[in-house]
């Protein structure tokens, strides 16, 4: 019954600014940390539960002199000073966070203090909120702005920041804190592919913060892992469908696989889940391959898993073990380097994936 | 020291989709209300304080069976059904609100329940938060998306919703509640002008919600009025500068005045402030006119105010009275009709200005 509102302009590609992406990136995280081996002892759990089981070495934490506003103020000022930028060259500023200390006044307005001396108040953008997705939503908004008629030639500034603290129990060692600021513009060294985002959005109570006076989230650990992995499946499927369509238009008729990625970075609640995610993507490649080579190569010995269904395997130990092994080399080559900050500082929520990006770029 | 990242594409205008704007609009507000004359009696204040002083006739309020999620679910479902739209024709959905019942899980994810049957989960956008600006930020984001390479030909859906309740005292009669949903796409009957937005963003504590367990905001009423009027001054100045630059490019050398607007709609905390805002804009026109005609016409009798400064006049009764009188006809012609919902239902925060738009369109 629906009619689409219009069609994409034929010659659009030639009109958007060239190479829109991340021009500069700055990261800030606390100078204090908890050693996870000490937390294992303190919690009275088996040695290795956090360090090997979760893949976490240290967990950064904020002192009582820091909050979400100070984290974001620091990272923005550092980015501006290090790149010798004046505040009137920013036309858009937005913040992704779920660390709420005011229900109405945005962190973005607090950051406007840094702009006061320049007299620049014509700056679009506010705070975006949905668990860890806020930073990515802000980044996508900034890129869209630069390609739209609203763009006035100035940079966009995207800030992602969070303080992740959990009640005592299983989730506590997955805490952390930090902020990332990204300068977005054309002619960037890190370019976003056009038309190739895969998104998965769903109503689920895996992680939420209904207790207004507590810093702690309510977490359903098992559901959370299922949501993460199923979203990964869906996004990869959507992404592949989009790139296949683009390739077919160009006259190329082949399948996209993980070999086509230079690197793979992920949102990292803890490093082990990222490693499992690489295995999961390989499982996706395997199941979507009409005729996988199982005699040798990356899929060798996996023929027993030919008829499994993605949605039945979130907690299947045999599948996980087999594909963790099969993807070990892939993980080491394309993902491991991105986990430095996550391993040494912990989960930062919204900036997590950009901390992974920073880790990769630094090595 | 700053170098701009690039320049606008020369032939961009011809490449963005044509006539991007609001394709359809739906409004929902509570069926219960408080009569403001009864509230005057209950509060023991002078008759007319709320009805004439603030310009408010009724104040809508939610029952305990409604919250921000139900308001937004209702308005989206109504928009989709009335326009006979299927949920898979939506590629972007975002919500502007400051009515927080969860600090992390967005209202947008709750709305995704409506999409479940369609199987469409590839839907970008989340919640945006900064007091009443959230709905406008979401709307700008949706328009940018449609003009960017991220657009896939589907509609964007923008939802603005809030429940405004105040502690007993001066601010209480300015409450209200409601939600507006807008379908955004090309070939729209309501088109957004390109490159002509004036924005003013500033760090100020006029209105905020630092008490996590209270529905009530903290309001500095006087500062709030000053912030509103000074932001209006700044935005109008930025807007005029931008349109003057555009006109000069086209070879037109004349000044922009209120006569160039067909209608003027505003965010309405209460109707009287909107009426004062029209007067304020006329004051802007008067002061920026190098040689205003004060012998007759709209500025007649105002020569005594020739040397005043905008920033000194936020609470100047003589200036207010003179320009309210001078702008009365302008208000009646271009703004009054837009205040129907605001007068009868009260302030809805993020959807307020779009409630004014709906009021204007309905008459």
Image (cartoon, coloured by chain):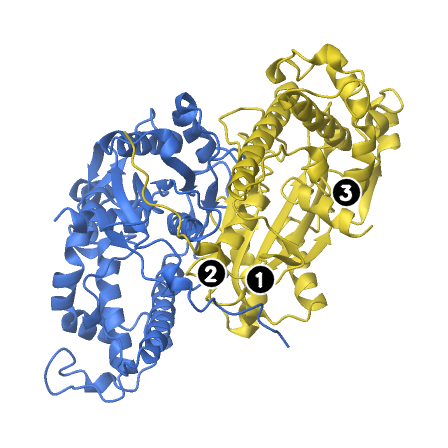
Chain colours: A yellow, B blue
For mark 1, give the secondary structure.
loop
Give the Cα separation between the discs numbered 1 and 2.
12 Å
Looking at this view, is A276 or A87 the one in front? A276
| Residue farthest toward the front in the current orientation of the protein | A251
- Is residue A303 shown left or right of residue A14? right
Circle 1 chain: A
Residue A338, label in figure: 3
Quarter holding the N terminus of chain A is: top left
Name the residue located 38 percent from the left edge and 40 percent from the top edge: B154
The answer, for residue A360, to whether it is visible in the render is yes
Circles 3 and 1 on the same subunit: yes
SS at badge 2: loop
Using the image as rendered, state which of residue B73 and residue A293 is in the foreground. A293
User: Which residue does the numbered mark 1 point to in the structure image?
Assistant: A186
- State the separation of the CA atoms marked 3 and 2: 34 Å
Instruction: State which chain disc 2 sits on.
Output: A
Residue B325 vs A60, above or below: the answer is: below
Residue tagged 2: A15
- Label 3 chain ID: A
Q: Position of residue B363 (x, y in %)?
A: 12, 49
């Amino acid at each position: 019954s629906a009619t689409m509102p219009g069609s994409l302009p034929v010659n659009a590609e030639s009109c958007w600014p060239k190479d829109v992406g991340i021009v500069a990136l700055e990261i800030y995280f606390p100078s204090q940390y908890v050693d996870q081996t000490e937390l294992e002892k303190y919690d009275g759990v088996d040695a290795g539960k956090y360090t090997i089981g979760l893949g976490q070495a240290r967990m950064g934490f904020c002192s009582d002199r820091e909050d979400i506003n100070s984290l974001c103020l620091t990272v923005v000022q550092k980015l501006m000073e290090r790149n010798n930028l004046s505040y009137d060259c920013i036309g858009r500023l937005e913040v992704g966070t779920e660390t709420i200390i005011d229900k109405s006044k945005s962190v973005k307005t607090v950051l406007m203090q840094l702009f006061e001396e320049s007299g620049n108040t014509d700056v679009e953008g506010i705070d975006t909120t949905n668990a860890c997705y806020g930073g990515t939503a802000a980044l996508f908004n900034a890129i869209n702005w630069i390609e739209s008629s609203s763009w006035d030639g100035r940079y966009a500034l995207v800030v992602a920041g969070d303080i992740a603290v959990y009640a005592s129990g299983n989730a506590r060692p997955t805490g952390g804190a930090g902020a990332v600021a990204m300068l977005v513009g054309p002619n960037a060294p890190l370019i976003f592919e056009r038309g190739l985002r895969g998104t998965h959005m769903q109503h689920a109570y895996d992680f939420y913060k209904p207790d207004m006076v507590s810093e702690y989230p309510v977490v359903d650990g098992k559901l959370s892992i299922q949501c993460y992995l199923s979203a990964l499946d869906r996004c990869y499927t959507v992404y592949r469908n989009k790139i296949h369509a683009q390739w077919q238009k160009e006259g190329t008729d082949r399948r996209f696989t993980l070999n086509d990625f230079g690197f793979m970075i992920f949102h990292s609640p803890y490093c082990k889940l990222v490693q499992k995610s690489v295995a999961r993507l390989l499982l996706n490649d395997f199941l979507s391959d009409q005729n996988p080579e199982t005699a040798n190569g990356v899929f060798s010995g996996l023929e027993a898993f030919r008829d499994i269904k993605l949605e039945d395997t979130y907690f299947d130990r045999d599948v996980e073990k087999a594909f963790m092994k099969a993807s070990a080399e892939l993980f080491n080559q394309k993902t491991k380097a991105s986990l430095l900050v996550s391993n040494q500082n912990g989960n930062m929520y919204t900036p997590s994936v950009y901390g992974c990006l920073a880790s990769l770029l630094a090595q």
